[in-house]
Amino acid sequence: QVQLVESGGGLVQPGGSLRLSCAASGSIFSIYAMGWYRQAPGEQRQLVAEIASDDTTNYADSVKGRFTISRDNAENTVYLQMNSLKPEDTAVYYCNADGTYGTTQTWFDQWGQGTQVTVSS
């Protein structure tokens, strides 16, 4: 199977920066899309940013120009650099990845456990 482990969340003041990391492990054959989603209390989980295997990126309008997604294919890791953070960015951030694993190249679509990001003074 495939596991995703996130790190890098925490408490930061408005205007500050954080960098989230998500490492995928297991018998991975290939990873296609990787992305970050967030869920604030009482709201649905929503896309923050995603990056395809050809490094094509897509961002939510609310984070364009402030957040940058990148990936290290050799390490099966995706990053989210978050700058100019606002209180409304407060949420649990989840990593997602899809691809294939194992000798049979079985499809996976996996989520991480989530990491809390709190933006407050």
Image (cartoon, grey):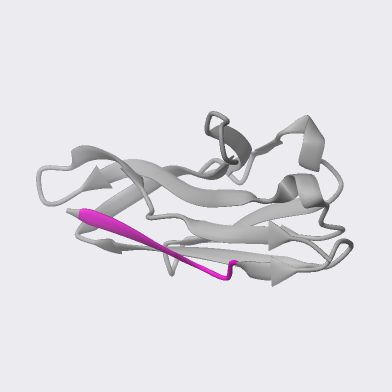
Question: Is there any visible trace of residue 101 in the rendered image?
Answer: yes
Residue depicted at x 73% and y 48%: 89
Residue drawn at x 68%, y 69% as measured from the top left: 11
Q: Compared to 75, does 2 lie above or below?
A: above
Quadrant in the rendering for residue 113: bottom left
Residue 53 falls left or right of residue 23:
right
Q: Is residue 79 at all visible to an observer of this figure?
A: no
Q: Residue at x 49, y 49 (%)?
A: 94
Is 7 in the magenta?
yes
Residue 46 position within the rendered picture, expressed as x and y whole percent measured from the top left: 58, 32
The residue segment tinted magenta is 2-9
Q: Position of residue 71 (x, y in %)?
A: 56, 58
The residue lying toward the viewer, choosing from 98 and 19, is 19
Q: Is residue 89 above or below residue 121?
A: above
Residue 43 is situated, as x and y percent measured from the top left of the image, at: 57, 30
Magenta span contains residue 51: no
- Res. 57 image quadrant: top right
The reply, left or right, for residue 97 in relation to residue 94 is left
Q: Report the quarter where the C terminus lies.
A: bottom right
Main SS, magenta region, reads strand
